[in-house]
Image (cartoon, rainbow, N blue to C red):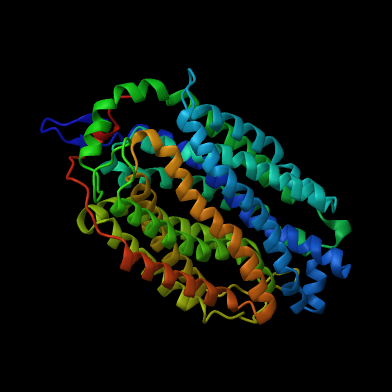
Amino acid sequence: METTANGGLKLNYKRTALIGFAFFGILLLWQVYDSWCPTFLTDIFAKHFYNMTSAELKASDPDKILNVQWIVGIIMACDNLAALILLPIFGNLSDRTKTPIGKRMPYILVGTFVSAVAFPFIPLFFHRHNIVGMVAMMGVVLIFMMMYRNPAVALMPDITPKPLRAKANGIINIMGYFGGAFATVLGLKYVLSSYINAPLAERNIWVIEMPFIIASVLMVISALVLFRTIRENELAEKLKDEMDMGEQLAAVATPIDDDKPMSRENKAMLLAILGAEFLWFMSDNALGTYIGNYVIYYLKSVSSATMILTILGGLASVIGFAIAGGIAEKIGRKWTISTGLMITFVGLIVMCFVRPTNLVKAGSAHGEFTFPVLLYAVWVLKGFGMALVHNCSFPMVVELCSSKKIGKFTGFYYAASMSAQTVTPILLGLVLKAAMAWRALPVYACILTLLSCTVFTSLVKNIKAGKVANVTGIEALGADD
């Protein structure tokens, strides 16, 4: 980061991309976790309650699969409940931490290595039908990922002036989606449904173990790259003047002053953003948690189709993240987010009309149906729309605090998202049990997305940041490390 001749600010794209390695590790692990664990739980509870694998239960009485989804939701939500408590704690701790390697890096390194060691034990315990061991390992991974996640995300605003954070967040998220894309490739190579649909005696543990091992190794590598290239303390000192200038250009109703209570206008803005965020994460996490089961047990299709969905949604997200900062500069972050929510809502309306094709897939060893093409279009719309939302929402939250409280306000942001992810798996599991129909999933997501758009559009002000200069081309990769 450096100032231009006219006193403006410009974004260092190279350094921002290097910070993005933290998010690469986060989304890599999260994608593997969300794609595999709900199906693991569904299968192990089918065996526990009905003495059949989930594939056998799907063939004999598919409605009973819905009966266990509320338990799946509780297990998935318990980990998020721990995260809801721990994220603000680690955010506050990292704000006050001082070490020779920085205030965020110790948490990033410890969280990475413990999570990476525990992660491959999840499929191992599942393969051995040990529900206690599997859930315990899921808990360990989630707890230490919370130690990692808040400080890792706070690192970008620590060294990026406020007016540049929407564009910087786009780069960070693109790096993260590379991690998610890699996890998706693993899902195409190691097909979960081939493991689930096989008889117990013929299940090959490496089909489910390898994605977890590879994700752990890459997560450690990404943390080491971050550690070797980003020197927190040096950068904090070097960029002090630019950070102060960013405060003067911030998109806030009233100036930030740590020595005074938060202003009424800024507090109202924060609560409105967090409330809307809670609702859109309720929707998005419901889809993320249950889409694997939706594909396998409702559409009766091959699980690798879910990975193709993720690829298409990820590509659309990358496009959204790449242009969201530019859109926000023109129309403001409020209307960029509102537009993203409405695009997502349109996609989910389309999803309400998706049905199983009832056409057996050619070459399928398990009589799986072909995948409905319409769902691909849904995921493209959702991926693009939610990229606009996520790109601008986090910068709006940390815009409302000084550099001394970034970890704390990052904790607020993730408290809203994690509380949503605590509630929604249980609530949707109960909805599915009551409705006895997988079609309740898109309806549920539609309602919550529309509510979030209504809350956000009606309660959040559109305050634009001061104009800044942005370097482009080869100069953007500059050498100011």
Quadrant where the N terminus lies? top left
Name the residue at the front extreme: 260
Residue 104: give x, y in percent of width and height.
48, 30
Residue 457: give x, y in percent of width and height.
32, 67
Q: Quadrant of residue 469?
A: top left
Residue 103 visible? The answer is yes
Q: Is residue 49 left or right of residue 78?
A: right
Residue at 49% across, 69% down: 376
Reply above or below: 336 against 247.
below
Q: Is residue 23 left or right of residue 298?
A: left
Q: Is residue 107 left or right of residue 461?
A: right
Residue 158: give x, y in percent of width and height.
37, 34
Quadrant where the C terminus lies? top left
Q: Quadrant of residue 50?
A: bottom right
Residue at 75% across, 50% down: 135
Residue 78: give x, y in percent of width and height.
67, 54
Q: Nearer the viewer, residue 92 or 434?
A: 92
Residue at 66% across, 34% down: 114
Residue 62 visible? The answer is no
Q: Nearer the viewer, residue 88 or 188?
A: 88
Reply above or below: 148 against 235.
below
